[in-house]
Image (spheres, rainbow, N blue to C red):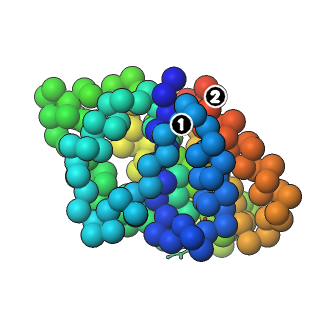
Amino acid sequence: MKTLVIVVHPNIEQSRINKSWMQALQEQSEVTVHQLYPAYPDFKIDAAKEQALLEAHDRVIFQFPFYWYSSPALLKEWFDRVLAHGWAYGPGGDKLHGKEWGIAISTSGPQISYQPDGHNHYTLDDLTKPFKATSSHIGTTFITPFILNGVTRVSDEELAQNTLDYVKFVTSMQPASV
Ligand SMILES: Cc1cc2nc3c(=O)[nH]c(=O)nc-3n(C[C@H](O)[C@H](O)[C@H](O)COP(=O)(O)O)c2cc1C
């Protein structure tokens, strides 16, 4: 199983959570870590290059901090350019069929805030539906997301354990999201 992790953080040097996750993955020989912001500071995505990278892997995980109930902007641009008609969907668009597709996100909002009666009104399951719908549209299996909530209250010890859990999430089989 060859896994590609696409890291989407506009300022990874200042990051605590995503940097910890990414650095741990960079020690895993069977995982390819690909950072979008350093690769495309001008937002000009090389779709052919990204498609070749996707074709060379069996599982793709998008790792990012939750920004305005979604991903940082470059990932949306990446989806718009890379998941092309006739390649990812539509006639002949079967290049990703059968692959696993997932997301790993960090949020500052605590878990309790992501409830119908909580501060953010919607669950993360609700808010991440566009990623799940995209996965369905391109014929991939959407795996249960890896989520770390309330990041400002996570201690260094908790982050160290969570980072080990994350490596396990990325490197082992995961159940499909229901
Ligand atoms: C532009 C911006 C938008 C954000 N939007 C949200 C949000 O919608 N929900 C939330 O829980 N946290 C939000 N946050 C907080 C980030 O998710 C949090 O800082 C990040 O997960 C921390 O990860 P890091 O240490 O890797 O940067 C936002 C932060 C920024 C800078």
Q: Quadrant of the C terminus?
A: top right
Counting from the top left corner in percent of width and height, residue 156 is at 82, 63
Q: Position of residue 135 (x, y in %)?
A: 39, 38
Tell me: residue 36, above or below residue 131.
below
For residue 60, above or below residue 17: above
Q: Is residue 161 left or right of residue 75?
A: right
Q: Is residue 7 above or below residue 171?
A: below
Q: Quadrant of residue 88?
A: top left
Q: Which residue is mark 1?
A: 31
Crowd class of label 2 (few under 14; some 14 to 19; many from 20; radius 10 Å) = few
**Looking at the image, which residue sits at the far right?**
157
The residue shown at (49%, 54%) is: 7
* Any part of residue 154 in sight: yes
Q: Nearer the viewer, residue 113 or 98?
A: 98
SS of the residue under disc 2 = loop
Picture disc at residue 163 = none
Quarter location, residue 29: top right
Ligand 1: image quarter:
bottom right
Left/right placement of residue 14 relative to residue 150 reads left
3D distance between C-alphas at marks 1 and 2:
11 Å
Identify the residue at horizontal 67%, vertical 67% (top origin): 16
Question: Which residue does the numbered mark 2 point to in the structure image?
Answer: 172
Relative horizontal placement of residue 2, taking residue 152 as reference (left or right): left
Mark 1 residue type:
Val
Three-letter code, disc 2: Ser
Whether residue 142 is visible here, answered yes or no, is: no
The residue at 35%/59% (across/down) is 39
Q: Judge depth for marks 1 and 2 and give the one in front.
A: 1
Q: Position of residue 26 (x, y in %)?
A: 58, 46
